[in-house]
Amino acid sequence: MKLVVGISRIIVGILFIFSGFVKLNDPIGFAFKLEEYFSPSVLNLEFLAPFALVIAILLVIFELVLGIMLLIGYLPKFTTWALLLMIVFFTFLTFYSAYFNKVTDCGCFGDAIPLTPWQSFYKDVILFVFILILFFNRKLITPMLAKPSHRWIVFLSFMLCFTFAYYVLMHLPLIDFRAYKVGNNIAEKMTIPEGAPEAVYDYNWKFKVNGEEKVVTTLGSYPQVEGEFIGVDTELVQKGYEPPIHDFSIEKGGENFTSEMLQEEKLLMIVMYSLGRSEAPGLEKMSAVAEAAKAEGYRVIGLSASGEELKEAVKEEYDLDFEIYFSDETALKTIIRSNPGIVKLHRGTIVQKHHWNDAEKLEL
């Protein structure tokens, strides 16, 4: 049993540290995921939405440090209880999300390893088993290193985690796992390769035959049925290929300018997913950034999901001399974890990305 406990301890500890780190690398992304869980359609905890970022940071730091505590054998009773309560909650949450199809990506490992809700639930079930082994055999969790060093290790871990969280919040994630990372070409990431699997649907055709409803299922073709046609429902049988970037567009006045913009030799995008939530000090810097870019021959555009009235008001207030186009809010949140944020492109390839705090680092 000691060997089983040792293996369980290593697996659980490393998984908690890894899971905590990839989310701590991008706390804003995890906060967006929590806001999704807090929405009325999932947990209906909207009052927590304004505190999503704080909750996200505290939760991932606790998760990461808990993994360290388990590995060094610090406070095994507290550690195993905390692990058990966390895994019970998250197993319920992932099951609820998967069964009712509420959230398509749990965010367990951030953007590093996207998991479907069912994959996440199965992962939690396996972790649950390992944690139960540790919980009922906590006496076999022997300390590593000298006991007096444990408190210092835990304290230092907390301090390093908070420092790292502050750094990525004031700049950008240290490691970018998203499809919009520097070096990627947006147009290429939007392309569906030739021969890629297509989605397969079942078509459930409804007819009224002899006064009773009859359902005939086909893969698409209209069935030959003698009766009155009522309607048809589709059911996804097999998901087709979905390109890494599938929701990005640049629109204005009902026109789509995506292809045109992605062919620009020099394009600077000022990303402001929600002007109502944009940081004022950042907006104040964007006028100078735009002027400097235009002087170097760049086409400068803004991207926002906000309404036209708010766009015009912000342009006037902050003296923004560039057009602000419409783009999907989720896509903009994914492009850059800064509001506003700066993205430089060359023929659709992302060359630079900067938080507004690092506007002076933009190379033109």
Image (cartoon, rainbow, N blue to C red):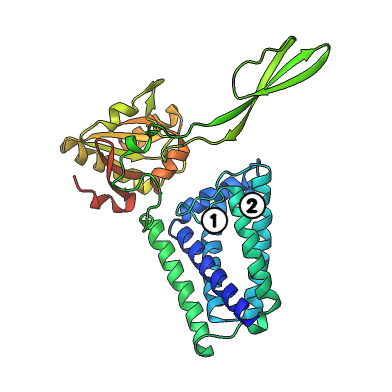
* Mark 1 neighbour class, 10 Å CA radius: few under 14, some 14 to 19, many 20 or more: many
Q: Dot 1 corresponds to which residue?
A: 108
Q: Nearer the viewer, residue 209 or 13?
A: 209
Find out whether the residues at labels 1 and 2 contact each other: C-beta distance under 8 Å: yes
Q: Nearer the viewer, residue 269 or 115?
A: 115
- First reached walking from the N terminus: tag 1 or tag 2: 2
Dot 2 lies on which element? helix
Identity of the residue furthest to the left in this view: 296
Percent x, y for residue 15? 53, 66
Examine the rendered structure and indicate whether residue 190 appears above or below residue 125: above
Percent x, y for residue 325? 37, 30
Percent x, y for residue 352? 27, 47
Q: Is residue 106 left or right of residue 177?
A: right
Q: Is residue 3 visible?
A: yes
Amino acid type for the residue under numbered disc 2: Thr
Quarter-of-image position of residue 100: top right
Between marks 1 and 2, how big is the CA–CA gap?
A: 10 Å
Q: Is residue 274 visible?
A: no
Q: Is residue 217 left or right of residue 343?
A: right
- Residue drawn 40% across and 45% down? 339
* Mark 2 neighbour class, 10 Å CA radius: few under 14, some 14 to 19, many 20 or more: many
User: Image quadrant for the C terminus?
Assistant: top left
Dot 1 lies on which element? loop
Amino acid type for the residue under numbered disc 1: Cys
Examine the rendered structure and indicate whether residue 127 appears above or below residue 32: below
Examine the rendered structure and indicate whether residue 322 appears above or below residue 364: above
Examine the rendered structure and indicate whether residue 229 appears above or below residue 10: above
Q: Is residue 42 left or right of residue 357?
A: right
- Residue drawn 39% across and 43% down? 335
Q: Dot 2 corresponds to which residue?
A: 94
